[in-house]
Image (spheres, rainbow, N blue to C red):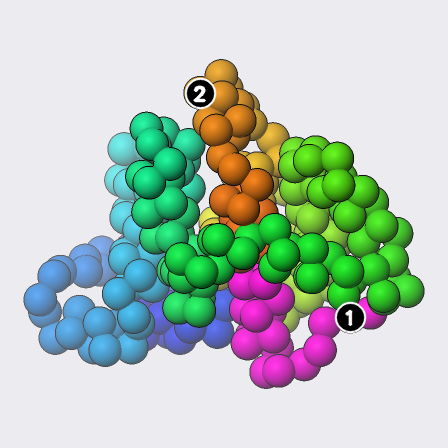
């Protein structure tokens, strides 16, 4: 169990799942409030503790034949994001946006939401100065100027997934894992904050139903810009953290 916790802390989610699967198959049961549970609570902060717990529950359900594909962790990652679109008022949307982005970084606060458009524009302009990312920067800035937020989100998603391929081995994955996977299968293979950042951007890029599409229209420019900026920034912060401070590829 502690091997799986260590792999989780290092960002090796695929290895973590494998290790948990092995101990579940030999009959191990994780009980609340036993000594091991107290150790795990000391090692993992509360959001990561619950995330790790959902991984365990998914494996347990699959091994017990309750579900062929359990999705507890998937819903743990995506439900708070989807709740943004279900908000009935701007005030409620702001609260739900703040809850999600504050989970990515404590520096993402109410002021961050209010200055969302400036934050996002600044990030994209920085990218446009890079030779490899200049084309992305120009296209994303044009999308912002046209208030085409769906296209802007798609461009951002494309560039971070491309960079994710370059860092795949650092997370115990391969570039093929990134290329061949749908986001619903890729997200559970990623560390919590990286998965949340990717899905936060994805939800802006590809609304799947009428409720989500209508909700996007209710988001003001600062709100949607703050969502995109928070996901963008958090993705690279987490990549740098797992890489030990190494710079992202040019």
Q: Earlier in the sequence, mark 2 or mark 1?
A: 2
Q: Residue 136 or 244: which is nearer the viewer?
A: 136
Residue 217 position, x and y percent, is: 53, 26
Circles 2 and 1, Cβ within 8 Å, touching? The answer is: no
Q: Using the rendered image of the protein, determine whether residue 180 is visible from the camera's viewpoint.
A: no
- Locate residue 196, reporting x and y percent: 48, 52
Mark 1 = which residue?
Answer: 249
Of all residues shown, which one is farthest toward the top?
210
Local packing at callout 2 (Cα closer than 10 Å; few below 14, some 14-19, many 20+) is few
| Picture layout, residue 94 above or below residue 40 | above
Residue at the image position 33 percent from the left and 47 percent from the top: 95
Q: Residue furthest right?
A: 131
Q: Which contiguous range is marked in magenta? A: 233-250
On the picture, is 20 further left or further right than 230? left
2 or 1: mark nearer the eye: 2
What residue did someone put label 2 on?
A: 211
């Amino acid at each position: 169990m502690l091997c799986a916790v260590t792999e989780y802390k290092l960002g090796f989610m695929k290895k973590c799942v494998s290790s948990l699967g092995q101990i579940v198959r030999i009959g191990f049961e994780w009980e609340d409030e036993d000594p091991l549970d107290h150790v795990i609570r000391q090692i993992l902060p509360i959001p990561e503790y619950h995330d790790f717990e959902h991984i365990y529950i998914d494996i347990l359900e699959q091994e017990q034949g309750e579900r062929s594909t359990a999705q507890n962790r998937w819903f743990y990652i995506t439900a708070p994001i989807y709740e943004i679109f279900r908000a009935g008022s701007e005030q409620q949307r702001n609260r739900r946006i703040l809850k999600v982005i504050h989970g990515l970084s404590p520096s993402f606060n109410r002021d961050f939401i209010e200055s969302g458009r400036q934050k996002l524009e600044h990030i994209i302009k920085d990218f446009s100065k890079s030779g490899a990312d200049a084309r992305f920067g120009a296209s994303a800035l044009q999308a912002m100027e046209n208030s085409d937020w769906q296209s802007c989100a798609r461009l951002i998603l494309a560039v971070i997934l491309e960079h994710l391929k370059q860092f795949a081995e650092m997370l115990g994955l391969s570039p093929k894992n990134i290329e061949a996977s749908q986001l619903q299968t890729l997200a559970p293979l990623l560390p919590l904050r990286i998965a949340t950042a990717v899905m936060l951007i994805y939800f802006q890029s590809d609304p799947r139903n009428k409720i989500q599409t209508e909700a996007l229209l209710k988001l003001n420019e600062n709100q949607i810009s703050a969502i995109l900026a928070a996901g963008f920034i958090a993705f690279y912060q987490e990549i740098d953290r797992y890489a030990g401070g190494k710079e992202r590829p040019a």
